[in-house]
Image (cartoon, helix red, strand yellow):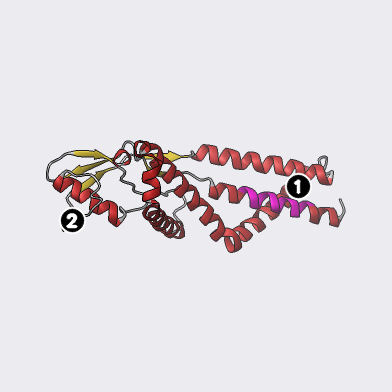
Amino acid sequence: MSKLKIVFLVLEYVIVCILAVSFFYISRPYTIIDHNKSNIICTNSNKTYELGPNFFYLFGNTFDPLIDSNIRKLCEYEIINDYQNTFKTPDNVNYKISPVYIQEMQWGDTFLVAIVFIMLGIGMAELIQKQIMDPVSKKKRYFFAAFVVSLVIVFLFLKPHIDNLYCERQVASSIANFKKSAYGFGLSRFEKDEAEIKKALNIARVQCLEKVKKNNLFESKF
């Protein structure tokens, strides 16, 4: 095999590996709050209220200030959503969360898809270069070199973009889960609270990126 063909083959391997590693990081599993099954427990009365069906959303580590205020009023006065803000918000937190988490994607699926992607990509690269019959030992060396190069490129140049896409997946899953659980309120309520919901999603996105920067690959929870 000529040196030019080797260069092109390795370059194709690098592209395949970059895409596979990027996919692996973007599609790795995470957990989000299940708004339909998670509850709020009022500490003063032990009454429980569902999150989503009562239009309480939790996209990050803490409730949005407006939602926190609504929950405090609910536990104190048994009123849901004080639209006119006629009731005073209790100074102290008078509730606790009983969360139920759901996991999006499985590690086995993530690894399997990444491996299949690499195998198909390698096959196409070799088919393009017509190197299917070349010794396997040679191709292993080329692939190993390409894989190392791809890791360097991903972690030095592409990691911030990959992290953003990963967190966008979490935010999209979380809002979809909330909307599904709060279906009874109708579209008009979502439009009314759109600004607050977007603010809460932006905070959740920032919190997700902060967690990812800690390099905890195997745990990401909303």
* Left or right, residue 138 beside residue 63: right
State whether residue 222 appears in this view: no
Residue 136 position in % (x across, y down): 76, 43
Q: In this view, does 82 lie above or below 155?
A: above
| Residue 153 located left or right of residue 206 | right
- For the image, the number of numbered tags is 2
Q: Residues within 10 Å of mark 2 (few under 14, many from 20)?
A: some
Task: Confirm or deny contact between disc 2 and disc 1 (CB under 8 A).
Answer: no
**Which one is in front, 87 or 63?**
87
Q: Residue furthest right?
A: 2
**Residue 157: where, in percent of width, then height?**
60, 63
Query: Where residue 174 sits in the image (x, y, percent)?
Result: 42, 45
Residue 180 lies, in percent from the top left, at 40, 37
Real-space Cα distance between discs 2 and 1?
68 Å
- Looking at the picture, does residue 127 appear above or below residue 149? above
Residue beneath the point at 85% across and 57% down:
4
Disc 1 residue crowd, few under 14, some 14–19, many 20+, Cα 10 Å = some
Q: What stretch is highlighted in magenta?
A: 9-20
Name the element at disc 2: loop
Can see residue 171? Answer: yes
Horizontal side of 13 relative to 60 (left or right) equals: right
Q: Which of 214 and 192 is in front in this view?
A: 192
Instruction: Say which mark, if any, is on residue 128.
Output: none
Q: Nearer the viewer, residue 132 or 110?
A: 110
Mark before the other along the chain sequence, 2 or 1: 2
Q: Mark 2 points at which residue?
A: 89
Q: Name the residue under label 1.
A: 139
